[in-house]
Image (cartoon, rainbow, N blue to C red):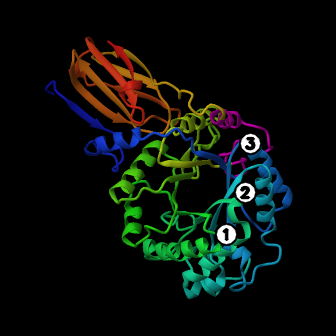
C-alpha cells in the first residue's frame, strides 16, 4: 500500500463524512438551560396499586427528577366503547399524578393500545379480542383516529398541566410491531397525530403533545411522517435511543433541520442493562456491568447538559425485573451505582465527562492504539507524520467503552503522532500520544 491518506470507516449508514460539517454544527448548538430529567416508571396495568404509584414517585423524588414517564393503556381505560371509562381504571394514574404534583414532578403519559371496539385489526384477530384481555388487536391503530383523539383529550382535561406532555403512541416505527401493527404506518400514525393534537389543545392548550416516539435514527420514518403532514401537530419530538445515543440524537436532529423542523427532541427512553456477565444481551441491547451502566448514565446526561435542541432526558427505567436489568434499583429494591450516578449528574450537570484515553504500543511491524472514552458516539482516530495526516478511522467502542485499533504497517512504528477523540466533543478534547 502506498503511504498516503487511508480512510477507514466503521460506521452505520446514517453517518458519512459528507455530513461532517452539519454534524459539527448540530453538536455545537449549546444552551445554558439543562434538559428536564426524569425516569420511566411502571405504567397502568390490571395489577397496579396506589402503593406502587407512591413508591415510584418516592424514588423519583429521591433522584431529584423533574419528570416521570408512564404508560396509559387506552384498551384498559376505555375497553367497552367510546366514552365508557372503566370504573377505577385510572385510579393508579390519578394517584401517580397527584403524588408527582405534590413533589413538584410532572408526568409524561404515553398513550397506546387500541381497545377491541376501535381496532383496525383483521377480522381474524378481532374475533379473538376480548375487553381487558391481552390481545394482538391492541397493537393495530384505531379505525377512526377521532376515537383516540377523544380519549387523549379526556386525559388532558382530567390532569391538565400536572402533565408534562401526552406522548402519542409508542414506537410506531418499531419493526417488531408490538406497539403499532399493520400497513401504511407513517400515514396511519400521522392521521392519529393530526386528530389528537387539536383535541388535546382544545381540552387544555397548556398540555404539550409529543409526536414520533421513534426508535430509528436514520430519518427514514421521520421523513415519511413529514411527507404525511405531521408538521404543526406537536410541541416536541419523542425519541427512544439506546445505542449510540449522542450520535442518534445528532442524526435525527439533522433530519429535522433539513425539513425545517425546529421542535425540541425529548429523549424519553435511554439506558443500559446491567446484566453482565450473566447475560450478553437484554431487549436487543448489550449487557454491561453495574459500574459501566452508572458511568454511561452520568456521561450521557452531562454530555446533553448544554444541548439546545434536547428538552428532556428520561432514563429507562426505575427497577430491575425478572426479565431485564435497566433499573437504578435492583429487583430487591436496593440502590445500584446508577442511582447515585443519575442523582449526581443532576446535581452537577456541567461537570466533565470521562476523558478519552490513549496508549500506543508496538506490535511487530505496526502500532496498536488502545484506550477508552465516554459512551454514546463515534470515535475518530487520526495518525500524523509531522504535520501530515496519514490515516483516519471512525470507529465504535465495545460494550465497556474500550477500543483497540491496529494501525497499518505502512505507517511504520516510530515518528507517529496519534490522537483520538469523541465526535460529540471534537478534537479539542482529544487524547494524544507519540510513538
* Prevailing secondary structure of the magenta residues: loop
Q: Give the quadrant of the N terminus.
A: top left
Q: Which badge, 2 or 3, comes first in the chain's sequence?
A: 2
Q: Which badge, 1 or 3, comes first in the chain's sequence?
A: 1
Q: Is residue 315 left or right of residue 15?
A: right
Q: Is residue 280 left or right of residue 419?
A: right
Q: Which residue is mark 3?
A: 329
Q: CA distance from mark 2 to mark 3?
A: 13 Å
In this view, the residue farthest toward the right is 51
Q: Which residue is mark 1?
A: 156
In this view, the residue farthest toward the left is 2
Element type at mark 2 = loop
Can I make out residue 133 in this image?
no
Residue positioned 86% across, 56% down in the render: 51
Are there few (<14), some (14-19), or many (20+) residues within 10 Å of tag 2? some
Are there few (<14), some (14-19), or many (20+) residues within 10 Å of tag 1? many
The image shows residue 69 at horizontal and vertical percentages of 66, 56
Q: Quadrant of residue 112?
A: bottom right
Disc ID at residue 410: none
Disc ID at residue 42: 2
Can I make out residue 382 in this image?
yes
Residue positioned 38% across, 44% down in the render: 26
Element type at mark 1 = helix
Q: Give the quadrant of the C terminus.
A: top left
Q: Magenta span has 333?
A: yes
Q: Is residue 382 above or below residue 204?
A: above
How many labels sit on residues?
3
The image shows residue 358 at horizontal and vertical percentages of 42, 20
Q: Magenta span has 161?
A: no
Q: Which residues are magenta?
A: 318-346
Are there few (<14), some (14-19), or many (20+) residues within 10 Å of tag 3? many
Amino acid at each position: 500500500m502506498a503511504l498516503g491518506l487511508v480512510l477507514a470507516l466503521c460506521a452505520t449508514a446514517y453517518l458519512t463524512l459528507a455530513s461532517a460539517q452539519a454534524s459539527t454544527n448540530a453538536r455545537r448548538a449549546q444552551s445554558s438551560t439543562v434538559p428536564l430529567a426524569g425516569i420511566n416508571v411502571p405504567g397502568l396495568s390490571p395489577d397496579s396499586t396506589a402503593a406502587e404509584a407512591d413508591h415510584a414517585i418516592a424514588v423519583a423524588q429521591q433522584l431529584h427528577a423533574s419528570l416521570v414517564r408512564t404508560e396509559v393503556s387506552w384498551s384498559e381505560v376505555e375497553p367497552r366503547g367510546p366514552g365508557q371509562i372503566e370504573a377505577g381504571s385510572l385510579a393508579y394514574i390519578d394517584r401517580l399524578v397527584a403524588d408527582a404534583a405534590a413533589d413538584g414532578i410532572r408526568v409524561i403519559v404515553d398513550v397506546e393500545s387500541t381497545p377491541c371496539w376501535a381496532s383496525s385489526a383483521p377480522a381474524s384477530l378481532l374475533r379473538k379480542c376480548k375487553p381487558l384481555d391481552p390481545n394482538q388487536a391492541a397493537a393495530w391503530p384505531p379505525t377512526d383516529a377521532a376515537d383516540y383523539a377523544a380519549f387523549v383529550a379526556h386525559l388532558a382535561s382530567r390532569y391538565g398541566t400536572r402533565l408534562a406532555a401526552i406522548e402519542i403512541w409508542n414506537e410506531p416505527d418499531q419493526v417488531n410491531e408490538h406497539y403499532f401493527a399493520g400497513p401504511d404506518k407513517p400515514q396511519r400514525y400521522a392521521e392519529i397525530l393530526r386528530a389528537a393534537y387539536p383535541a388535546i389543545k382544545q381540552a387544555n392548550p397548556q398540555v404539550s403533545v409529543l409526536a414520533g416516539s421513534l426508535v430509528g435514527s436514520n430519518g427514514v420514518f421521520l421523513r415519511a411522517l413529514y411527507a404525511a403532514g405531521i408538521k404543526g401537530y406537536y410541541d416536541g419530538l419523542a425519541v427512544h435511543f439506546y445505542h449510540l445515543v449522542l450520535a442518534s440524537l445528532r442524526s435525527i436532529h439533522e433530519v429535522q433541520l433539513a425539513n425545517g423542523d425546529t421542535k425540541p427532541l425529548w429523549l424519553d427512553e435511554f439506558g443500559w442493562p446491567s446484566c453482565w456477565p450473566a447475560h450478553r444481551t437484554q431487549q436487543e441491547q448489550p449487557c454491561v456491568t453495574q459500574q459501566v451502566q452508572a458511568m454511561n448514565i452520568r456521561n450521557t446526561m452531562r454530555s446533553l447538559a448544554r444541548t439546545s435542541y434536547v428538552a428532556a432526558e428520561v432514563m429507562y427505567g426505575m427497577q430491575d425485573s425478572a426479565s431485564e436489568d435497566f433499573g437504578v434499583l435492583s429487583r430487591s429494591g436496593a440502590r445500584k451505582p446508577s442511582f447515585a450516578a443519575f442523582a449526581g449528574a443532576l446535581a452537577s450537570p456541567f461537570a466533565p465527562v470521562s476523558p478519552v484515553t490513549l496508549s500506543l504500543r508496538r506490535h511487530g511491524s505496526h502500532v496498536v492504539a488502545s484506550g477508552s472514552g465516554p459512551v454514546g458516539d463515534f470515535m475518530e482516530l487520526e495518525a500524523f507524520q509531522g504535520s501530515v495526516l496519514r490515516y483516519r478511522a471512525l470507529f465504535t467502542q465495545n460494550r465497556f467503552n474500550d477500543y483497540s485499533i491496529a494501525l497499518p504497517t505502512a505507517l511504520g512504528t516510530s515518528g507517529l503522532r496519534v490522537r483520538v477523540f469523541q465526535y460529540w466533543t471534537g478534537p479539542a478534547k482529544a487524547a494524544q500520544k507519540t510513538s
